[in-house]
Image: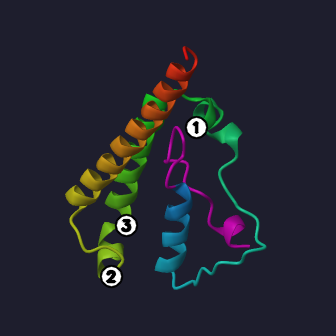
Amino acid sequence: ELAKEEKFDKSYIGNAAREDIDFHIRQAKKGRKMVYVPDAYEIDIPQNMVKGGGCHSMKLWKIILYTINNHKLLLNRHYDYLRQEGYISISKNMAMQLLIRDIAKDVATLWKFRFMNFIRLFK
């Protein structure tokens, strides 16, 4: 019922990263409680609404850029609420820096894995 009443925000473009968190925060701002139910189904933006059919069909650099852009959008919209409720205690700038650092670590790990598999081809 909530998903019918409060639609997912289509502003989260590309890989649509953070659109689910945005939905949950908007519910929390209205005083609604979100709970984890292990038997529940996931609700996401349908892939046909996401440019290119979702992140699985994109180049890695595009996924990274969309993730950073969407994270910035989420922080700009909800930072004050998250800070007020005690969910975040750092600046927006620091939150963006930490996200970029984590993405860089993930990318480095991915490329290391790809390189090791490439090297195995020649052994």
Using the numbered discs, state the Cα–Cα distance from disc 1 to disc 3 in whole angstroms: 24 Å
Q: Is residue 68 above or below residue 31?
A: above
**Callout 1: 10 Å neighbours few (<14), some, many (20+)?**
many
Q: Is residue 31 above or below residue 23?
A: below
Mark 3: amino acid? His
- Going from the N terminus, do you reach mark 1 or mark 2 first? 1
Residue on which the image places disc 3: 78
Give the residue displayed 63% in from the left and 60% down from the top: 7
Mark 2: amino acid? Gly
The residue furthest front is 123
Residue on which the image places disc 1: 55
Give the residue displayed 49% in from the left and 47% down from the top: 11
Q: Which residues are magenta?
A: 1-18
- Image quarter where the C terminus lies is top right
Mark 1: amino acid? Cys
**Callout 3: 10 Å neighbours few (<14), some, many (20+)?**
some
Location of residue 68 (image quadrant): top left
Residue 100 lies left or right of residue 110; in this view the side is left
Marks 1 & 2, CB-CB < 8 Å contact: no
